[in-house]
Amino acid sequence: MRTDAPQPPRSAELAAMRELIRRHKRADIVFGLVGLVCMMVGVVTLLVLFVDLMIDGLPRFSRDFFMNFPSRHAERAGILSAWVGTCLVMLVTMVAAVPLGVAAGIYLEEYAPKNWVTDLIEINVTNLAGVPSIVYGLLALGLFVYIFGLGQSIATAGLTLALLILPVIIVTTREAIRAIPVAIREAAYGVGATRWQVVADHVLPYSIGGIMTGVIIGLARAIGETAPLITVGALTFIAFLPPSPLRSEAPYVSFEWLLSPFTVLPIQMFNWVSRPDEKFLLNAAATGIVIIVATLAMNALAIWLRYRLRKRIKW
């Protein structure tokens, strides 16, 4: 009686299968080694450059370096106006970009109807995240400086950087919300929750770690931007501070600083690098260390926040 049962493979076929498996394993090992070498080349190169920067810049670290204004004499030059300007510009950027970006991401993901208009907005937001920063500088020059009349001020710089990181925050917020399982939404709707209750009480608490990570990474990108700020008129040499945001008398808050001239750390570093005196290169190296440490600190804060928020949700 004839049966259609499969016949066991012959020895030649088994040998060919084993050889194919060995070949694939060798390819996996080779690919892993190549990837490891490429990663190490990049990491070691960055580490060598950072160590060289620290060797040049660490001797300039002192209280006077952080508390003095820029000077024609390299030994007496400091970054007081630069780091104060950086802090104020980043404050405006954070206040302008974070609420708007998070709200836009929530709307596009949870409320916006699925039609061609929404698709067009999503495509444009995604594309804007990759636009060169100088384009945002030119846009801000025409919009904030000439049309709104804000001039070459801290407000203009902060809003320019807010435009720069806004698409990044929107995309990151949408991805964090999209990662929440649909079952959580369905369970909330099943017990009678409204759409806003689902978003506020369930979606946002679970996605806040990813949202905060995207926000901090966006701010870390903005802190090192130079091209858009030069375009809107950041000063390369400034020996005074803007008015204080706080006052000793009522109403205790002042907004005069928003319209003050400014400079930031990357521009101060660029100014010193362009000087012919080699001593200014040491100041530029020290400023570069400050920028790198600030960026690494913000990224470390993002990792820590994500870990803490996820751990709290699990418990």
Image (spheres, rainbow, N blue to C red):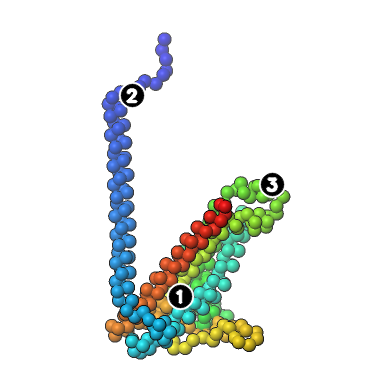
Q: As shown in the figure, which amino acid type bears the numbered disc 1?
A: Pro
Q: In x, y percent, where is residue 247?
A: 59, 86
Q: As shown in the figure, which amino acid type bears the numbered disc 2?
A: Pro
Q: Is residue 312 visible?
A: yes
Q: Secondary structure at mark 3?
A: helix
Residue at figure coordinates x 47%, y 88% from the top left = 240
Looking at the image, the residue that sits furthest to the right is 192
Identify the mark at residue 47; answer none if there is no mark: none
Instruction: Looking at the image, tell me whether mark 2 or mark 3 is earlier in sequence order.
Output: 2
Residue occupied by mark 3: 190
Instruction: Looking at the image, tell me whether mark 3 or mark 1 is earlier in sequence order.
Output: 3
Identify the mark at residue 9; answer none if there is no mark: 2
**Relative side of 215 to 9, left or right:** right
Q: Is residue 138 visible?
A: no
Residue occupied by mark 1: 228
Closer-to-camera residue (277/232): 277
Q: In x, y percent, where is residue 31?
A: 31, 48
